[in-house]
Amino acid sequence: MRRYRRNVTQPSDIAFLLILFFLVLTGAVVDRALTIASSEVTTAHVQESPVIITVDTAGVARLGQSHLDPSLRTQIQGKAVIVEASADTRWDSVVAALSTVTDYGADSVSLSMGKQL
């Protein structure tokens, strides 16, 4: 006499149970929010145009016509800075310019590559 193996579950049953499991699991997560007092007055900051630093193919970083040096720290500190470099610029020069701008206290630093200088 042959014994037939019974198929205990159908694939659709397993899929249905998985769907139910994930629905119950995601419903258990409770959103938490912070309450903020509305009596506080906030001022909006006026967005300034970013400071643009160019790094030429010789590796010289410039802010306008002047070389990037510590005397320009006040023009960079707390502002958004874009470092522009061409595709031919050496990476060590670009990294040095990014590091200098960060050390001078720039609020945010972006990199623009590929522009012919």
Image (cartoon, grey):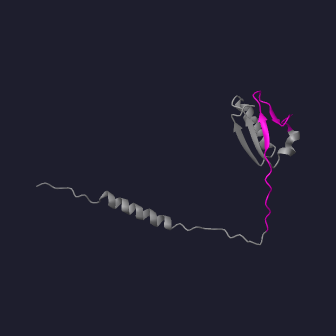
Coordinates of residue 110 in the picture (x, y in percent): 72, 43
From the image, give the main secondary structure of the stretch colored magenta: loop
Which residue corresponds to the image point at 85% horizontal and 45% vertical from the top-left?
Answer: 75
Q: Residue furthest top?
A: 58
Q: Residue at x 77, y 36 (%)?
A: 97
- Badge count: 0
Q: In this rendering, would 113 be left or right of 10?
A: right
Q: Looking at the picture, tell me which residue is in the foreground, 113 or 15.
A: 113
Q: Quick check: can you spot residue 100?
A: no
* Quadrant housing the N terminus: bottom left
Quadrant position of residue 36: bottom right
In the rendered image, residue 31 lying in the magenta stretch gets the answer no
Q: Position of residue 115 (x, y in %)?
A: 71, 34
Confirm whether the magenta stretch covers residue 45: yes
Query: Residue 14 placed where, x, y %?
Result: 35, 59
Extreme-front residue of the structure: 116
- Above/below status of 56 relative to 46: above
Q: Is residue 111 visible?
A: yes
Residue 78, position as x, y percentages in the image: 81, 49
Please say if 53 is above or below 10. above
Q: Nearer the viewer, residue 110 or 105?
A: 110
Residue occupying the far right of the picture? 71
Q: Residue at x 69, y 36 (%)?
A: 113
Give the side of residue 82 with respect to residue 31, left or right: right
Name the quarter where the C terminus is drawn. Answer: top right
Q: Image quarter for residue 61? A: top right
Q: Residue furthest left?
A: 1
Which range of residues does the magenta coloring cover?
41-69
